């Protein structure tokens, strides 16, 4: 690291004390209680300083979509467990409602999936892909014509 040659500022000379929770952003004040719980669970599950200020809006969107998916999922499950009405015009309305809730739930879960990839919180995004040529070359491979042992 290159040291600055100009005079040190007061900020450069000050000492920053770090506590156990430093580097973990608190949820914004304008989110619901459940969204704040989701925020904290995501932030606490990742390493410190994982979420810079530039990712907070994405994380906030992730929490909102997660909250919406929970609500749509709960309502969808309730309607499915209750089942359709016996007969009449309510049957068509029931299936239209099921269809609409399924679409809304699917939209929210796709948004969650997309944001989890962007925020690098999806498990697949955190795994390291083995690129070592020797490891790939030395991995035993079964040929199609060989019998399983």
Image (cartoon, helix red, strand yellow):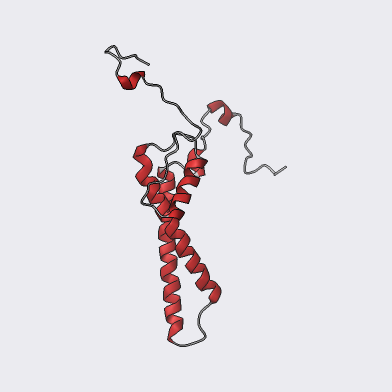
Q: Is residue 110 visible?
A: no
Measured as percent of width and height from the top left, residue 73 is found at: 48, 63
Q: Residue furthest top?
A: 5
- The residue shown at (51%, 43%) is 123
Asked whether 36 or 118 is in front, the reply is: 36
Measured as percent of width and height from the top left, residue 6 is found at: 26, 13
**Quadrant of res 106:** bottom left
Q: Residue furthest right?
A: 149
Asked whether 49 or 126 is in front, the reply is: 49
- The residue shown at (48%, 68%) is 75
Q: Residue furthest bottom?
A: 88
Taking 127 as reference, is 10 above or below it? above
Asked whether 109 or 7 is in front, the reply is: 7
Q: Is residue 16 visible?
A: yes
Q: Residue furthest left?
A: 6
Q: Give the number of callouts.
A: 0
- The residue shown at (45%, 76%) is 95
State left or right for residue 138 relative to residue 89. right
Measured as percent of width and height from the top left, residue 28 is found at: 38, 46
- The residue shown at (52%, 68%) is 77
Specify the quadrant that holds the N terminus.
top left
Specify the quadrant that holds the C terminus.
top right
Measured as percent of width and height from the top left, residue 53 is found at: 36, 38
**Quadrant of res 138:** top right
State left or right for residue 137 relative to residue 51. right
Asked whether 18 or 131 is in front, the reply is: 18
């Amino acid at each position: 690291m290159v040291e600055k040659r100009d005079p040190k500022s007061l900020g450069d000379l000050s000492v920053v004390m770090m506590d156990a929770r430093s580097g973990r952003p608190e949820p914004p004040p304008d989110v619901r209680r459940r969204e704040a719980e989701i925020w904290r669970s995501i932030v606490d599950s990742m390493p410190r300083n994982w979420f810079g200020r530039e990712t907070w809006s994405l994380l906030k969107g992730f929490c909102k979509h997660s909250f919406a998916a929970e609500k749509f999922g709960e309502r969808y499950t309730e309607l499915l467990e209750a089942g359709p009405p016996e007969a009449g015009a309510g049957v068509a309305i029931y299936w239209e409602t099921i269809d609409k809730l399924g679409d809304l739930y699917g939209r929210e879960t796709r948004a969650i999936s997309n944001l989890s990839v962007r925020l690098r919180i999806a498990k697949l995004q955190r795994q390291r892909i083995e690129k070592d040529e020797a490891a790939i070359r030395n991995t035993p491979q079964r040929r199609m014509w060989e019998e399983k042992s």
